[in-house]
Amino acid sequence: MSTPPPQPALHPALADRPGHLLWRARARVAAATEEEQRAGVDLHAVSVLRDLVGSPGGAPRSQQELADTVGISRTTMVRVAAALVAEGLVQRVRNPLDRRSYALTPTDAGARAVRLWQERTEAVQERLIRGFTDEEREVLAGLLLRVAGAEVGEETAEAVRDDIGFLVGRAHTRMHRRFLEDLAPLNLEPRLFGTLNLLARSGSLTQSEVARHLGISGASVVQIADDLEARGFVDRRRDPTDRRTQRLHLRPGATETLAAAHRVEAATLAAQMDDLSADEVATLVALLQRFVTSPEP
């Protein structure tokens, strides 16, 4: 199994922002998941089957309910369900809550598969939180669960509720959805907000520098730069020392928009983390910083 490159350092403009840290943490979980999938394990299928097996009494669950619980799209859920049925790990039965529709329930083979897969998925989580003490892992899981709020329902299997990768995804989903809605009146999105913060702190940056600071691909930065330029927030200018390179510069007026976005961010965080004290928010930030930047073994 190949080892991913070291995680890029957090930029000072973003290092203490919970939304950015959750986004970076989710990206790290996704990278680990993709690596396991290349090794022949579909972790979406593992999560769905584990949730089914962990349901009280193995009760049937609808595909939409499972998709919401595990945090995957309907399209992915349809693919996962079809594969699990074809492999004999789950079966479709009449939905006890709606006899006109079907739900999924695990087979005996599915229960055995969960036990076999559990070791593999636990190994992924161990890689992600290597270096954390048992107490720190428990604290991080508890804080993420509280931030995720309703994104993790009471019906979610206990095994999934303790999974750091799953909780990172659900906490990010809740935070991102709310921030996206709150930024809309400013003609901004979270991904654009992060780039503006970088430029406000660092002055002009090349697109490759933005990519490194955000931990994303060059192609993703090109799209971000296109969107920021189209919305009138940045200009692209040739680097005077290297005419082949373009630098991003804030345009007049962007600073005022960014200041308004900071106020929106504060209100969003207050609403999304109202269950956490200031000390608990600081603890969550510190743990996520370690999670995001810790090197792979």
Image (cartoon, rainbow, N blue to C red):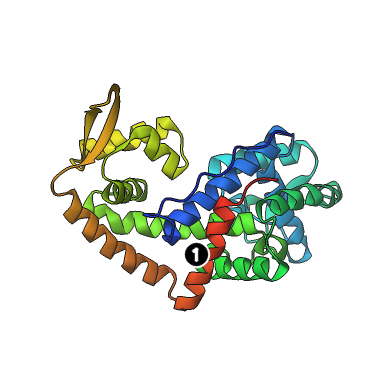
Q: Is residue 93 visible?
A: no
On screen, residue 221 versus residue 60, left or right, reads left
On screen, residue 219 versus residue 289, left or right, reads left
Q: Residue at x 22, y 60 (%)?
A: 260
On screen, residue 157 versus residue 195, left or right, reads right
From the top left corner, tell me how far across and down residue 195 is, in percent: 33, 45
Between residue 248 and residue 143, name the one nearer to us. Answer: 248
Position of 174 relative to 73 (above/below): below
Is label 1 in a helix, a strand or a loop? helix
On screen, residue 46 versus residue 181, left or right, reads right
Identity of the amino acid at label 1?
Answer: Val
Can you identify the residue that label 1 sits on? Answer: 285
Q: Quadrant of residue 157?
A: bottom right
From the top left corner, tell me how far across and down residue 297 is, in percent: 70, 45
Q: Residue furthest top?
A: 244
> Dividing the image into 4 quarters, which one contains the N terminus?
top right
Q: Residue furthest front?
A: 241
Q: How many marks?
A: 1
Q: Residue at x 40, y 55 (%)?
A: 12
Q: Is residue 199 visible?
A: yes
> Callout 1: 10 Å neighbours few (<14), some, many (20+)?
many
Q: Quadrant of residue 230?
A: top left
Between residue 170 and residue 66, name the one nearer to us. Answer: 170
From the top left corner, tell me how far across and down residue 4 is, in percent: 63, 37
Between residue 181 and residue 172, name the one nearer to us. Answer: 172
Q: Quadrant of residue 269?
A: bottom left
Q: Residue at x 23, y 49 (%)?
A: 187
Between residue 103 and residue 241, name the one nearer to us. Answer: 241
From the top left corner, tell me how far across and down residue 190 is, in percent: 36, 51
